[in-house]
Amino acid sequence: MTVALSKRASDVRVIALLSLAHGSSHFFHLILPPMFPWLKDAFALNYAELGLLMSIFFVVSCMAQAGSGFLVDRIGARPVLFSGISLLILAALIYSQSNGYFMLLVGAVIAGCGNGIFHPVDYTLINHKVSPPNLPYAYSMHGITGYLGWAAAPAFMVAIAQLTDWRIAFLAAALLEVMILFILWLNKSYLLDNVQERHDNTHASTQGANPSGTPESVFAFLKLTSVWLCWIFFFFSMATTSSLQSFAPSALFGIYEIPLNVGSYFITLLALGSAGGVLVGGYLAAKLRAPERTVTTCLSLTILMSLLLASGWIAIELIPILFVAIGFGYGAVAPSRDLLVKAATPKGVSGRVYGIVYSGIDLGAAVGPFIFGLFMDAGLPKALFLGIAFFQLMIIPTVFKVSSRAIPKAA
């Protein structure tokens, strides 16, 4: 009984620490965009130049995410985590001292490098340190703090910039991340994964699957179809989310003549619905143990809501409910989705697999808004919601294929 209570307490501590780290990474996704009006005036920039900063951030993060998984498997998750947070702090400091566009570009590159480490680190530690019965709840809390980080950043940055100036806002973001790094450092014993144990598991798994004893390449996992199916899942998921965040207010104005400031409020409802969905999704994943059915049901909900919005027939009073429902569907998918990825991950290579798979998120965030931006420029606002419904429909077959190909003894 005492051992069980001790393990539960350890699980709670690990989940809380990694959720805090994950929330801070999402917070840093959005410290730059709220400052665009100030940066535009300070350095006489146009919106294309400002938008390029975010594209660079996500492209660099995509490459860093794919590569950092190998580093996690080589040296362990904890030093990579501390290095990533340190890079985010450095990026915020560079933003705060920028004297022109070049320094902002340098800050975006460094921030992308720092952001790219979180998913390989977090999921490696969660899978290694949290007991299996608590994994769905770990995935759920990890996802919730990501959405809360997105929600907190604009309010935090704008409030400080209005009270002081934009440079102080970036310094405050750096100080906040320093505090988080300090908390993680104080609890560093909970963030230590046994790299040698994972290497031994890899060797044992390789010997079982490869009796001839011929060593496999560190890139052997890339031959697994399930890895690329998961990548497709994440690419299209984030392409739809980032496109909604970018263009939903403009699309709603074009279809329903809803003012842009009111449409921006619906993005907040989308994030809050997602946070609630992740919370419920963790319970569903733990109780139902049928991730493919949960994902399919939730995606069907988001497809239906998107088609209703595209129709132009919905009463304006109902649109907030539809955005909450879309957000709920996105969020509820997350814990079951993460269980599918874990089931498809061979022993000992979780860092590499999560690095490659989650790089789809960053690439989707960079590509999705560009695609749907073309439709918006062409005066086709309904195409945003129709395209999102189509992307969600494309994801569903990958879920069943991943489930059918999942490795029985995953780690």
Image (spheres, rainbow, N blue to C red):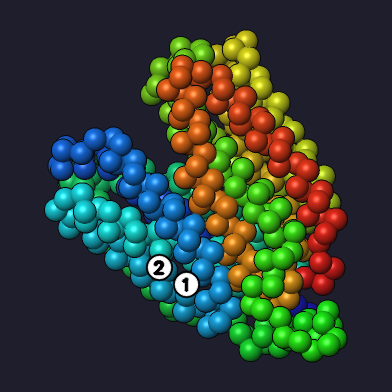
Q: Where is residue 11 in the image (x, y as percent from the top left)?
A: 65, 71
Q: Which residue is drawn at 45% across and 58% down?
A: 61
Which quarter shows the C terminus?
bottom right
Per the image, the residue denoted by label 2 is: 85
Q: Looking at the image, is 191 positioned above or below residue 323?
A: below
Q: Residue at x 82, y 48 (%)?
A: 400
Q: Looking at the image, is 407 positioned above or below residue 366?
A: below
Amino acid type of the residue tagged 2 in the rendering: Ile
Q: Where is residue 332 in the image (x, y as percent from the top left)?
A: 68, 44
Residue 285 appears in the figure? no
When asked about the image quadrant of residue 28, the answer is bottom left
Q: Residue at x 50, y 30 (%)?
A: 372
Q: Which residue is drawn at 74% across and 33% down?
A: 300
Q: Where is residue 97 in the image (x, y as percent from the top left)?
A: 17, 58
Left or right: 323, with 200 as reference point: left
Q: Which mark is residue 81?
A: 1
